[in-house]
């Protein structure tokens, strides 16, 4: 799947991103389709990663998606941070409700492209 | 585990709780320095969360704490101490990167995938007149990708330990055996219990060993290990970008300090508290 990315640095970011998502949980399921890699776990976390020629798209929680296009380290950091936050929040909700973040603890300013 | 400890549930020894002042007194003494390992079995117990929680609890008890979290996987403690994403995610882009920061005005944290990357200066200045707890948190089984070994884990504490602590003759890069080990696991039964016993109790018979279970089994797997219930409500703090302050972590910290103090008063080799 990474071979679809012509740019080597972006290909490296794709590989790293996919590896980190897979490590979120011992029960993460990975499904590879012709166009994307799909991650999910029993608590409802979902991420789809779709490689294109010069970038890859990260779709977090496809039911109510947040799409991020990654073509460099800034996009990688934003996408991975948001995916992690989504994963942690979903697990917190599954336990009976997430505790709110203190003040404005989250300072992520991602470059997102919503559909 | 030594014969002086027998299997008992946490509420059976609640009378051993210490006040904050007493906790500081437990480690009083200019050269007092102890090491604590947090071995997290699987990812369900959230290594970074428990590491941040224990470090914060120890620091609130008035002792200086240096937390070293090692091994791959997210989140890491940088997330729970509210580092910018670019900073706490740096090791995912470069495995040689070391992330450091402050727990509070008294204590520091260090995160890296490879424990060999930890250098003494990462821990910051250690006041010689303040008791010091070195907490090392890692996944169990150890991260094969980073070729982490228990020997490497022990060497981390040796590198950041004060040279004058302990015997005073130990070289800075010498391994520092753990004074205590807390294993966090789903359920401490059967094969899991035997594996934990073999992996930690056999090579470190002098270490105080506790097991925190997410799903209490009601038994001890035939072992004499003390067990603590890992509160399910801790999951609610998973997404929060701040260290958890649940009483569970204060309980672990106080119990550990109490037991270490008792052992030392009975004439262990290191400086008595």
Image: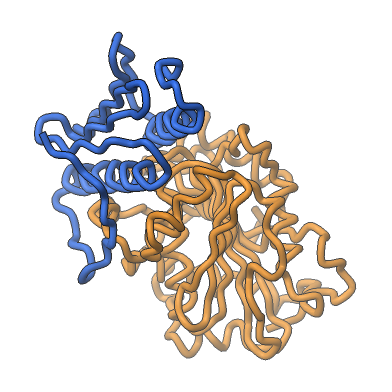
Chain colours: A blue, B orange
Q: Is residue B145 visible?
A: yes
Query: Visible in this render: residue B209?
Result: no
Q: State the quadrant of the C terminus of chain B.
A: bottom right
Residue B222 appears left or right of B199: left
Q: Is residue B38 above or below residue A4?
A: below
- Describe residue B74's horizontal placement relative to residue B169 as left or right: left
Q: Nearer the viewer, residue B271 or B65?
A: B65
Q: Position of residue B161 (x, y in %)?
A: 73, 70
Q: Nearer the viewer, residue B58 or B17?
A: B58
Judge by depth and name the residue closer to the eye, A22 or A15. Answer: A15
Indicate whether B82 appears above or below A24.
below
Query: Given the current orientation, which residue lies at the most extreme top position?
Result: A34
Count the numbered circles shown: 0
Quarter where residue B195 is shown: top right
Residue for point 26% across, 61% down: A106
List x then y, in percent, for residue A113: 18, 39
Residue A13 position within the rendered picture, expressed as x and y whole percent measured from the top left: 45, 34
What residue appears at the point 66 percent right and 47 percent down from the top-left corner? B201
Residue B3 % position (x, y): 66, 57
For the residue pair B102 and B194, the one nearer the viewer reads as: B102
B185 to the left or right of B70: left
Q: Would you identify the image quadrant in which residue B130 lies?
A: bottom right
Q: Residue at horizontal 42%, vertical 85%? A: B19
């Amino acid at each position: 799947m990474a071979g679809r990315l012509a740019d080597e640095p972006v290909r490296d970011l794709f590989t790293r991103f996919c590896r980190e998502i897979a490590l979120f949980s011992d029960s993460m399921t990975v499904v590879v389709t012709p166009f994307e890699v799909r991650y999910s776990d029993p608590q409802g976390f979902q991420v789809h990663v779709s490689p294109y020629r010069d970038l890859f798209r990260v779709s977090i929680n496809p039911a109510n998606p947040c799409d991020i296009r990654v073509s460099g380290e800034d996009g990688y950091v934003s996408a991975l941070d948001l995916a992690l936050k989504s994963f942690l929040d979903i697990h917190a909700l599954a336990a009976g409700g997430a505790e709110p973040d203190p003040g404005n603890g989250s300072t992520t300013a991602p470059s997102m492209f919503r559909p | 585990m030594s014969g002086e400890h027998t299997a008992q549930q946490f509420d059976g020894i609640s009378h051993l709780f210490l006040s904050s002042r007493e906790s500081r007194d437990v480690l009083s003494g200019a050269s007092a320095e102890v090491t604590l390992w947090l071995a997290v079995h699987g990812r369900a117990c959230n290594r970074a969360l428990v590491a941040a929680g224990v470090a914060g609890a120890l620091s609130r008890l008035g002792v200086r704490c240096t937390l070293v979290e090692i091994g791959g996987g997210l989140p890491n403690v940088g997330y729970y101490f509210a580092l910018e994403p670019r900073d706490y995610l740096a090791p995912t882009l470069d495995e040689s990167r070391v992330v450091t920061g402050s727990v509070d005005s008294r204590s520091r944290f260090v995160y890296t995938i490879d424990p060999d990357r930890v250098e003494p200066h990462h821990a910051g200045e250690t006041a010689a007149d303040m008791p010091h707890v070195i907490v090392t948190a890692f996944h169990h089984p150890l991260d094969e990708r980073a070729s982490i070994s228990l020997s490497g884990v022990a060497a981390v504490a040796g590198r950041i330990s004060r040279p004058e602590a302990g015997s005073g003759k130990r070289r800075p890069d010498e391994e520092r055996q753990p004074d205590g080990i807390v294993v966090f696991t789903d359920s401490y039964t059967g094969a899991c219990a035997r594996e934990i016993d073999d992996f930690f109790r056999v090579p470190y018979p002098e270490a105080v060993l506790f097991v925190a279970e997410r799903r209490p089994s009601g038994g001890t797997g035939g072992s004499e290990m003390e067990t603590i219930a890992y509160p399910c409500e801790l999951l609610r703090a998973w997404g929060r970008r701040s260290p958890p302050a649940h009483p569970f972590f204060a309980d672990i910290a106080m119990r550990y300090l109490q037991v270490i103090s008792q052992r030392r008063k009975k004439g262990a080799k290191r400086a008595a508290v």
